[in-house]
Amino acid sequence: MFRALSCFLFFILFSVASHANTGFRQLHINEANSRDLNIAMWYPTAETGSQEKVGDNMAFYGTSALRDAAPEAGEHPLLLLSHGYGGNWRNLNWLATEMAAQGYIVAAVDHPGTTTFNLHPQDAKELWRRPQDLQRVMVKIISTPSLAGKVDAQRIAAAGHSLGGWTVLQLAGARFDPARFQNDCRAHTWLSACKLIHTLGIDNAAGRLAANDSDPAIKAVVSLDLGLARGFTPESLSQIAVPVLIMTAQADSDELPARLESGYLTEYIPAAVRQLVSVEGATHFSFMQQCKPGAMALIAEKEPGEEIVCQDGGTRSRAAIHHQLVRDISVFLNQALDFQPQSGGNPSGLYR
């Protein structure tokens, strides 16, 4: 989340193989008085034909899908995805393809200012717009069923990695207090999140970051090793009423320790609505796409230090970690949304 990847990584894109009957479409939203958004959508389709690799390159595996295929008939649950700081919509592609195979419409957005493709300082300081980005995507997809299919408005969830986890918690009702966060950082100066106070405009956010961004349309959220958690007020966390799955990296780091970030959520979110999973062998970057053999050396040659994005902990492969993540996340979401996945789609082989 907290490592701003360099220009080289603009072209280093993602993982895992998709399934037949998964459509894929990209969209650019340009609306008056709002910032431009680039969106990617995965969705069920009844079409067959020649699939194409989406985003495959030298470092990361791509996914296979039917580009611009017609959406499948009927209503489908919607899953919104939010990437981490310096990331992009491709980072959770492994999850998107699997959930689309189960019958979900999945939509991910590049958040301006905090995405690989736009790290403009002024955009980055508008942190409060991140939850709004997801809400705009949700409205667009619901109002335009020709894009990815008809959404079941009673079955909408959101999942995010790192800063994306912070983003989806905002939609669940968590409220961020910039003053509280800055005060906490005086005692935890080594945390990665605390090093982004000025970059994200937290030191000059006025009341915008403290606004209530909760959205009643969101019925469940998944936090994947989030950061900035310690700025959420205990009162707001204690009032969260939707199911929350909190997943942490067992092989965490001093800069992003699970006990101080995800652990802070578990301290205050009611036990009745939260689940906590410590993912064996996972580092913070294990939640991203799978690297190809030789990717670490390739990245290290171009941008020394950034090869950390391919490092996992312990002896488990990233493929094995993703298998667990897909299983746990799909079980959680299907139960939380009371959804019966499509036959054969829960969950299938990731790296075929």
Image: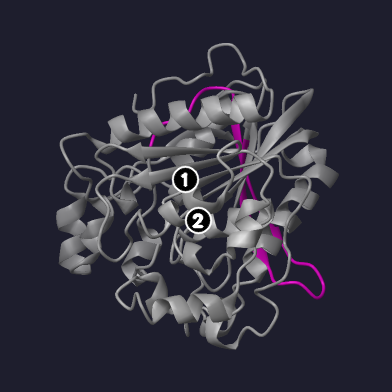
> How many marks do you count on the picture?
2
**Circle 2: element type:** loop
Q: Quadrant of the N terminus?
A: bottom left
- Report the side of 338 relative to 178 (left or right): right
Amino acid type for the residue under numbered disc 2: His
Residue 52 in view in this figure? no
Dot 1 or dot 2, earlier in sequence: 2
- Report the side of 319 relative to 63 (left or right): left
Residue 135 found in image quarter: bottom right
Q: Decide: marks 1, 2 in contact (CB < 8 A)?
A: yes
Amino acid type for the residue under numbered disc 1: Leu
Residue that appears at 49% across and 25% down: 19
From the top left corner, tell me how far across and down residue 277 is, in percent.
40, 37
Q: Which residue is mark 1?
A: 92
**249 vs 73: above or below:** below
From the top left corner, tell me how far across and down residue 317 is, in percent.
23, 35
Magenta segment, which residues?
A: 16-42
**315 vs 190: above or below:** above
Residue that appears at 59% across and 65% down: 233
**Circle 1: element type:** helix
Q: Quadrant of the C terminus?
A: top left
Most extreme residue toward the bottom, as rendered? 204
From the top left corner, tell me how far across and down residue 302 is, in percent.
21, 67
Near-viewer residue (147 or 187): 187
Is 18 inside the magenta-drawn segment? yes
Residue that appears at 65% across and 59% down: 236
Q: Residues within 10 Å of mark 2 (few under 14, many from 20)?
A: many
Q: Which residue is mark 2?
A: 83
Residue that appears at 22% across and 69% down: 303
Q: Which mark is residue 287?
A: none
Near-viewer residue (114 or 330): 330
Is 255 inside the magenta-drawn segment? no
